[in-house]
Image (cartoon, helix red, strand yellow):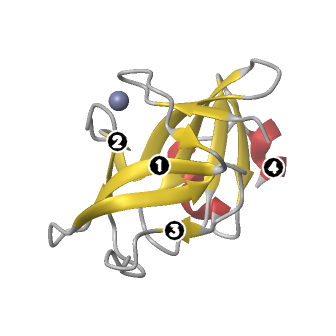
Amino acid sequence: MSNNYSCPECKSKMNIGSSLVFSAKSPDNKRGLLFLDTELGNYTKRTHPDYELQQGVEYKFYCPVCHIKLNKAENPNLVKVHMTDDTGKEFEINISNTIGEHCTYKIKEKSVEAFGPDADRYNKYLDLPSEYHKYL
Ligand SMILES: [Zn+2]
């Protein structure tokens, strides 16, 4: 696996080993570090045992380096990072901000590839052209 993830704002790399690192905040202001797997469609989440994620709750996600909010302004349910794959192709990756909601979108211009059992959740929002619906 050699996908590299970076912050859309400061361009800092956000993956270390097989983890994609976010700073997260719950609606009741509990802050902590959240490690996701760098493999698309793998929904393993790791945190420090003192930082328990609340299932079904919408979190805010921040870049661990520059602390900019990564939830999209036009749809705060989607968290945006940049990814470069092992061939050097660049994509926008969107994931759900809701703990336990498993969907990932790999976006390049009008082409969207969707992963995860909840992938149709944001289908309408992403407004996929019909020829790309086969991915959902
Ligand atoms: Zn940043």
Residue type, numbered disc 2: Pro
Classify mark 4: residues with Cα within 10 Å, few (<14), some (14-19) or many (20+). Answer: few
- Asked whether 136 or 87 is in front, the reply is 87
Q: Residue 41 in the image: x percent, y percent?
A: 72, 58
At horizontal 43% and vertical 30% (from top left) the residue drawn is: 7
Can you give x and y, in whole percent of width and height, for residue 102 in the image?
A: 60, 67
Q: Do the residues labelled 4 and 2 touch (CB within 8 Å)?
A: no
Counting other residues with Cα less than 10 Å from the Cα at mark 2, is it few (<14), some (14-19), or many (20 or more)?
A: some
Give the SS element for disc 2.
Answer: loop
Label 1 or label 2, whichever comes before in sequence order:
1
Question: Quick one: label 1, few (<14), some, or many (20+) residues within 10 Å?
Answer: many
Q: Is mark 4 on a helix, strand or loop?
A: helix
Disc 1 under 8 Å from ligand 1? The reply is no
* Label located before the other in sequence (1 or 4): 1
At 64% from the left edge and 46% from the top edge, which residue is drawn? 17
Earlier sequence position, callout 4 versus callout 2? 2
Pick whichever of labels 4 and 3 is earlier in the sequence: 3
Residue wearing tag 2: 64
The Cα–Cα distance between marks 3 and 2, rounded to whole angstroms, is 15 Å
Horizontally, residue 136 falls left or right of residue 63, namely right
Q: SS class of the residue under badge 3?
A: strand
Furthest-left residue in view?
29
Q: What label sits on residue 21 in the rendered view? A: 1
* The residue carrying mark 2 has its beta carbon less than 8 Å from ligand 1: yes
Q: Is there a contact, CB below 8 Å, between mark 4 and mark 3? A: no
- First in residue order: circle 3 vs circle 1: 1
Instruction: Say what amino acid the circle numbered 3 marks.
Output: Arg
Is residue 90 left or right of 134 when viewed as pictured?
left
The N terminus, quarter of image = top right
Q: Mark 3 points at which residue?
A: 46
Residue that numbered label 4 is attached to = 135
